[in-house]
Amino acid sequence: MYGTLRYGMVGGGQGAFIGEAHRKAINLDGKARIVAGCFSRSYENTLATGAALGIEPERLYKRFDEMAKAEAARDDGIDFVVVVTPNNTHYPVCKAFLEAGIHVACDKPLAISREQACELEALAKEKDLLFMVTYTYMGYVTAKHVREIIRAGEIGKIRTVIAEYPQGWLAREGDWGGKQGSWRCDPSQSGKSNCLADLGTHVENAIATMTGLKVKRVLAKMDIMVPGRVLDDNDFVLVEYEGGATGMYWTSQVAIGHDNDLRVRIYGDRGAIFWSQEDPEKVIIAKEDGAPLVEHHKGYCSIAPEAAKYGRLPKGHPEGWLEAMANLYRSFIECIHAKRNGSFTSDMIDFPTVSDGVQGVKFVEACLQSSANGNVWVDL
Amino acid sequence: MYGTLRYGMVGGGQGAFIGEAHRKAINLDGKARIVAGCFSRSYENTLATGAALGIEPERLYKRFDEMAKAEAARDDGIDFVVVVTPNNTHYPVCKAFLEAGIHVACDKPLAISREQACELEALAKEKDLLFMVTYTYMGYVTAKHVREIIRAGEIGKIRTVIAEYPQGWLAREGDWGGKQGSWRCDPSQSGKSNCLADLGTHVENAIATMTGLKVKRVLAKMDIMVPGRVLDDNDFVLVEYEGGATGMYWTSQVAIGHDNDLRVRIYGDRGAIFWSQEDPEKVIIAKEDGAPLVEHHKGYCSIAPEAAKYGRLPKGHPEGWLEAMANLYRSFIECIHAKRNGSFTSDMIDFPTVSDGVQGVKFVEACLQSSANGNVWVDL
Amino acid sequence: MYGTLRYGMVGGGQGAFIGEAHRKAINLDGKARIVAGCFSRSYENTLATGAALGIEPERLYKRFDEMAKAEAARDDGIDFVVVVTPNNTHYPVCKAFLEAGIHVACDKPLAISREQACELEALAKEKDLLFMVTYTYMGYVTAKHVREIIRAGEIGKIRTVIAEYPQGWLAREGDWGGKQGSWRCDPSQSGKSNCLADLGTHVENAIATMTGLKVKRVLAKMDIMVPGRVLDDNDFVLVEYEGGATGMYWTSQVAIGHDNDLRVRIYGDRGAIFWSQEDPEKVIIAKEDGAPLVEHHKGYCSIAPEAAKYGRLPKGHPEGWLEAMANLYRSFIECIHAKRNGSFTSDMIDFPTVSDGVQGVKFVEACLQSSANGNVWVDL
Amino acid sequence: MYGTLRYGMVGGGQGAFIGEAHRKAINLDGKARIVAGCFSRSYENTLATGAALGIEPERLYKRFDEMAKAEAARDDGIDFVVVVTPNNTHYPVCKAFLEAGIHVACDKPLAISREQACELEALAKEKDLLFMVTYTYMGYVTAKHVREIIRAGEIGKIRTVIAEYPQGWLAREGDWGGKQGSWRCDPSQSGKSNCLADLGTHVENAIATMTGLKVKRVLAKMDIMVPGRVLDDNDFVLVEYEGGATGMYWTSQVAIGHDNDLRVRIYGDRGAIFWSQEDPEKVIIAKEDGAPLVEHHKGYCSIAPEAAKYGRLPKGHPEGWLEAMANLYRSFIECIHAKRNGSFTSDMIDFPTVSDGVQGVKFVEACLQSSANGNVWVDL
């Protein structure tokens, strides 16, 4: 086995949800430990967060750029940084660490403009650094299984895709969802889209990852349902993929009755696959019309080895969202080790990369343009 | 109680599914019996079908127009006719019986053009006749319950609607679905649309019936997925309703893994409702985000009286599709009795009417226009 | 085809549930019509019920024995009688009609003692008459499919069976369930058992029908949960079958949250089957541990022909409890026709017979004895 | 906040499932780290396991008793030990650490005889040490919620309990389930019971924890379904609780189609609760017969605060089995800290204790006696 890596975090101070979640996910397998951080724009928060995590005070930084330089300069500097700041700051933070030669794991969406996203992609390539964008849901064993069986041709040529990601937490008028919701609804922190940028990028990435389909063009209807808002909270997108398949996406934050309901249904000419994030131990497959539906569970012998290897527990022992994220980190960390010892090849990558992040940003931009122009088709 | 009515049927000869289904549904409550028929363009089939049903030979007709006149002339003539012929003949058949002064129950879609549909609507009004269009699914106790609780304001003002009706029976290349599929895929029998006319009209009617929303405009993408077909088999429709709500519909005949999967999800500003035709004993209601989901069953005290009265069996005793259709006929037959004894008022109507049928035809025409013009918005 | 049969009914007057249900089920396929009745101990109720059904007054009888004789004497007398009276009167009523030479369909449980039941069985045999006991649930297409695949050896040798039939309608203290509940809780009308006689006989019959297993002995714990009752309302039964398989049954009328929840799970050495009455379009089959679960729907090509032939509607069009009962009558009526035209053979019988009814009564008696003696094993 | 604790492990060497699972669960929250171990009877395995975990070689022990003494003697000795050896060695291992004054977390079942179990309980009390028995399933947020709402009287007085824990992994003749199955089927390692000791203790503990009911007596039928086995693999247990409630338990390792299917249904006189380990984000509650079923999810405002506080993620973000186990450790670790700083009170304990473990052993012994004596009632 290999030793434990060191990592730092930007964002994720006390009170933030996603930073704590990343830390727990990384803890799970015990392959990396946090040693540095710039957790908040409030230095006090950074100090408090760092103290609770047992980080040495000298590695708690006031500014992310200072952290990038200092850590790059240390012999025991961090092996990678986790970026969990609001969307509009992903770009400068990631850039600083890439320039310092440090591998990056950044929350999605990657950036708030295509230019930012492409620049980060180019920089990572130039510096030969690993750059993961944490589309968590693609870490589930069953999500990987869906990808594998589609690759293997089990459902034939894909004809149409129905995907959705409804939530209900911002349904109430006058309710901005607390800290989590406030920044998402605020253009100065989240860019030109709220719901589609937050949820639609997950949908786009899920379909791209599972099917390998490339989006040719989109037609989007992005709406604001709750009076007083300035960013979208309910979105429809029609999609045409290269090769002729079609897709229909729905994302919402006003869909009462849904918690975090990413669902994917993929129809080929020889079968169909149904997958749901909230029920992640299962994949349902139909092989032809009028033939029985078949339900595969994590841990069954029918699960593809490329997916099954990520399971930590036997069948019937549920693994959840943190385990999915931990699976992304597992591959990311393995790749860092391989980079170090010279054994890295790009086919080792089993996590969403900066290029996936770029696609997400392009998707959102095309949808914004379509919606602004009266729901017309926009090429990607 | 009142006596048993007499009815006739056009279409529904041996080998046809839907005619037999109508007869069984009417049988269920024993409130009308079949006494006349023109079951097929083949007179032999009509004779054989009629014999099996115990109909007197003199009331088995070679032509529907002959039947309309003869029955209208008899003292013991039929009280209503059931029209279950292919879509493109609904218009002349219904017209003949209306002109003969006979109430009509016609399968959906009502007709293959807006002009035909409107003419039938006008004629029924002029003749003061009842005209039911058998959108079967609206007969379920739970479908009626959905309508009632939305009327009662339980989910507030509707914001968005997600509805779908996927089937998989025409997914296979080279397979036209036997007798049922052949005429649906043939423009000379089913008009300009296959899938949307067959399934989309059910979706349109379900949403109109349950929500009362009026469609303002549609944007449709109607596709052919199976090579060799000339009519649509997979359709996406975006909808804007009067008042600002939005909708997204999907219908398909190539969705492997789905049998007959009409599903409706309706989101208001104070709650949401989920209903599924294949699981028709249940309605799921969410009253606000983060509050528990509530599952109502047919037979529960929580079911609205206007819906509950249609249940024949106690809770936990499933009632199905034939019972739903029987519920439409129950109201239709009650209205005929009321017409006879002078007690009829229009608020007694609890079945889909010719006007609902007209809406369906308009919806399909607008979608066809939208799709033909590059997926642009078309006003209804 | 054959003509329509004539039938009469004892019990099932206005206000009774089960008689009306039998009539609707028989109506469904239109193969028999009601022409005589003794619907109630109240002659007024009989007259009113008969009038609503369009029965000639002379065939509305004050007493069942009078009806049996009168109908047997008529040229156009009834072909069969339907007995839907309280449990304790099944015996005399059925006996009267058998002695008059009339085929019998009787609600379950067949009788309130083993002696009564065996006498009816012997009498039916002696008179060479058909005797159906309406264990409705065995009429479902999927229930028949379960039987067929077990017969075909698909799950191998059966090891253990878990079956249950919980209801909640008698859960409330001081609530006797109205007319339906009152007679069931009253020993003078329902015999020595309430819950087990009502629901346990269904469980016993379902397992016997589906698996072919013979009960060797039982160990029962029959309890009264609601204070004030004198008959059981919550029962546990352990079962040993001939050949070594074991079973565990639960029936309850105090299980809040359950409507009418007959569920069967059967485990063999090569697979398992799950079936639920409230979800009767489906059968779930597991072929070995760790292999995917497979969900078969009514209408799928995988459904055994012996079961599939009872489906009236295509896949995805739900059929319910009335259809299940109609399926029993379909075979019963076919057998009566075959008796008439001399083509009858016993393998034509595809409905529960008087012998199944005898087994049910024996099962209840053995359970009563076990429970009375401190939950000891009692041979059947 | 408090600092990180140190722990050691006995058992859990490479190739063992449960030890690795405990380590991951403890990792999750980062509140304790492993510093010592005696992972296997094979010292080589211990060394390899320890090396992979980064443990100093001097704290990798050949024998557990040596480890207990050595760690107790160190200034930086372990704060607690995790015992994950086969069932028959729990007793000596736990005893050694208790005698050394070290808190213990031991896998279930606690021991293989009532005497062993009671001695451990007494010793823990005498030494004033914390002793957790890791009945993992009681760590789920929803399991705690069930306990809380029953405590709060929401379903009234409990009448009956139906609980089951079927698995299918040992269904195949000649298949002993690899390493996991072999020791369970071997009396020399697992004691007198396989299935009931492994799964039945979970059922017993779940019901005791959730309901607070005390078992008065049991009647058990413990069977061997797979030829060649000497220990039970399919068990039925009838239960009478103090106060009059009844229960029915089923455990199986030959139930093909079930993965790890612990399910609990609890019926009171004012409501019922349904909970399933494989679907641990949900609790279904029925408040009275004929009233709607209500589905509560982790993260909903309706979840009791005593349960909700254990959730790490928002609603719709699944948490699984490792999180459940981590929740047990969370309380265990908090109690150890409280013991240290003198703030401990017994009502802080929110994990299964040695006394729960004793109950499990007593339950299994009573069942064994019942089954051996012909399925008679045995008092606990």
Image: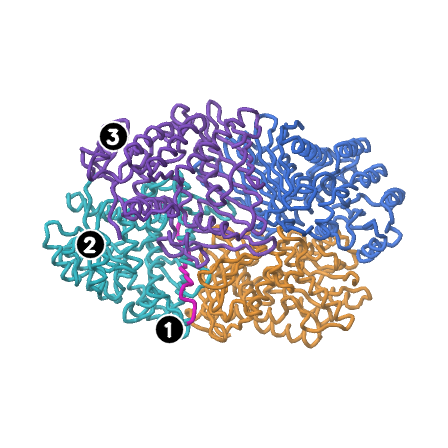
Chain colours: A purple, B blue, C orange, D cyan
Viewer-closest of A327 and A279 = A327
- Horizontal side of A219 relative to C53 (left or right) equals left
Residue B234 sits in quarter = top right
Question: From this viewpoint, is residue D153 visible?
Answer: no
Q: SS at mark 1?
A: loop
Counting from the top left corner in percent of width and height, residue B90 is at: 78, 41
Vertical position of residue A141 compared to residue A106: above or below: below
Tell me how far mark 1 sits from mark 3, CA to CA. 61 Å
Nearer to us: label 2 or label 1:
2
Dot 3 amino acid type: Asn
Dot 1 amino acid type: Arg
Q: Which residues are magenta?
A: D151-173
The residue wearing badge 3 is A45
The residue wearing badge 1 is D229
Counting from the top left corner in percent of width and height, residue D36 is at: 18, 54
Q: Residue at x 57, y 69 (%)?
A: C152
Looking at the rendered structure, whether the residues under marks 1 and 3 are on a common chain is answered as no
Name the subunit of mark 3: A
Mark 2 vs 1, N-terminal side: 2
Count of picture labels: 3
Tell me how far mark 2 sits from mark 3, CA to CA. 33 Å
- Horizontal side of B307 relative to B10 (left or right) equals left
